[in-house]
């Protein structure tokens, strides 16, 4: 997540420092960023010159103090261990200016917990990117009652500047927007599997050919407007009462995890892999890039039409 976000900022003309504890992690980050940019050049989304300028804007270090010195915006993307995050924030706040924005990519901890030892909790915010962050447009911006409104506005503008589609949550809630909707859909998908209605593969095919196709440019709310809300009312009334309302993780999912069926990390999950998912990841990213390119071209076309009116 960290290297993908760093790539975004560098592509937008920002000087970026990536900090990791180990040199091997930094080398991996450099390799991943370079490969990602090369693919964008191949797809004519960047020029070779733009790629070289992007790479030149990124420096790598294992020294946290060196990484944060003079920074205006810090994005923390370390493991989801609260103690580690609090220790890191303590070091950051002892060095940076009071005006420096400290952001976390977490989707686990609320800001109340993240700022429990902070000197200036008002400058903390959550910017939740989605994997891979250099390709998926959305960023969820999360605030809490102590967050300075100027910090929210500045962060929003910065996310727009680096090419993201930011959404600001009016209040903090577990899972934010996307993961709450995703988990609700997963609950029903798991329920369909448990009842023997469909296989994992058929559920994927069904969703990719329906919601996945439509929601790329037309979200769930707009889709219902276009379908007609009287139709939505009838559909929801007929189906909602039969949907799963369980609050428990499915037993088959627990068993899969217990049996080391973790997905690409162990080469087995809902599907089987023989390369740690490398082919699946490359195929996914290739499709994401094609879709991103299409969306970018669509936005440029809309701006041209708007400016000509």
Image (cartoon, rainbow, N blue to C red):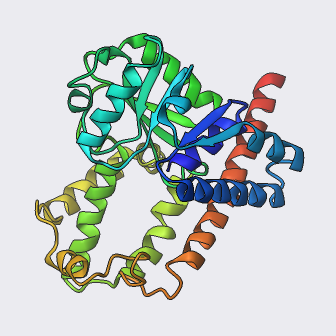
Q: Quadrant of residue 165?
A: top right
Residue at the image point whose x is 28% and y is 57% from the top:
183
Q: Is residue 169 visible?
A: no
Q: Nearer the viewer, residue 193 or 237?
A: 193
Residue at the image point whose x is 72% and y is 56% from the top:
34
Figure check: 103 above or below 252: above
Q: Nearer the viewer, residue 230 or 91?
A: 91
Apparent side of residue 43 relative to residue 127 in the rendered image (left or right): right
Q: Nearer the viewer, residue 301 or 268?
A: 268
x, y (%) of residue 167? 45, 32
Q: Quadrant of residue 143?
A: top left
x, y (%) of residue 281? 56, 70
x, y (%) of residue 8? 63, 41
- Image quarter in which the C terminus is found: top right
Residue at the image point whose x is 38% and y is 84% from the top:
268
Apparent side of residue 282 relative to residue 173 in the rendered image (left or right): right
Q: Quadrant of residue 149?
A: top left
Q: Nearer the viewer, residue 161 or 21?
A: 21
x, y (%) of residue 101? 46, 21
């Amino acid at each position: 997540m960290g290297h993908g976000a760093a790539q975004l900022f560098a592509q937008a003309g920002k000087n970026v420092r990536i900090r990791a504890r180990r040199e091997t992690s930094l080398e991996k980050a450099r390799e991943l960023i370079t490969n990602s940019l090369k693919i964008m050049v191949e797809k004519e989304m960047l020029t070779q010159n733009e790629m070289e300028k992007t790479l030149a804007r990124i420096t790598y270090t294992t020294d946290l103090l060196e990484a944060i010195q003079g920074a205006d915006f810090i994005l923390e993307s370390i493991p989801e261990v609260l103690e580690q995050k609090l220790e890191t924030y303590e070091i950051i706040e002892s060095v940076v200016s009071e005006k420096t924005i400290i952001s976390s990519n977490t989707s686990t901890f609320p800001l109340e917990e993240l700022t429990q030892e902070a000197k200036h909790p008002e400058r903390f915010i959550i910017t939740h990117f989605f994997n891979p962050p250099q390709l998926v447009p959305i960023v969820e911006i999360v605030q809490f009652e102590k967050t300075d409104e100027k910090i929210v506005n500045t962060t929003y503008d910065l996310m727009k500047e680096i090419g993201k589609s930011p959404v600001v949550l009016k209040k903090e809630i577990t899972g934010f927007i996307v993961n709450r909707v995703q988990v609700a859909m997963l609950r029903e998908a798991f329920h369909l599997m448990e009842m023997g209605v469909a296989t994992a593969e058929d559920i994927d095919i069904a969703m990719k050919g329906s919601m996945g196709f439509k929601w790329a440019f037309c979200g769930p709310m707009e889709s219902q407007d276009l379908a007609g809300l009287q139709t939505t009312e009838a559909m929801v009334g007929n189906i909602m009462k039969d949907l799963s309302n369980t609050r428990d993780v499915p037993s088959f999912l627990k068993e899969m995890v217990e049996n080391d069926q973790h997905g690409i990390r162990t080469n087995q999950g809902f599907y089987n892999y023989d390369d740690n998912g490398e082919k699946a990841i490359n195929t996914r990213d290739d499709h994401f890039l094609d879709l991103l390119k299409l969306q970018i071209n669509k936005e440029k076309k809309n701006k041209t039409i708007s400016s000509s009116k």
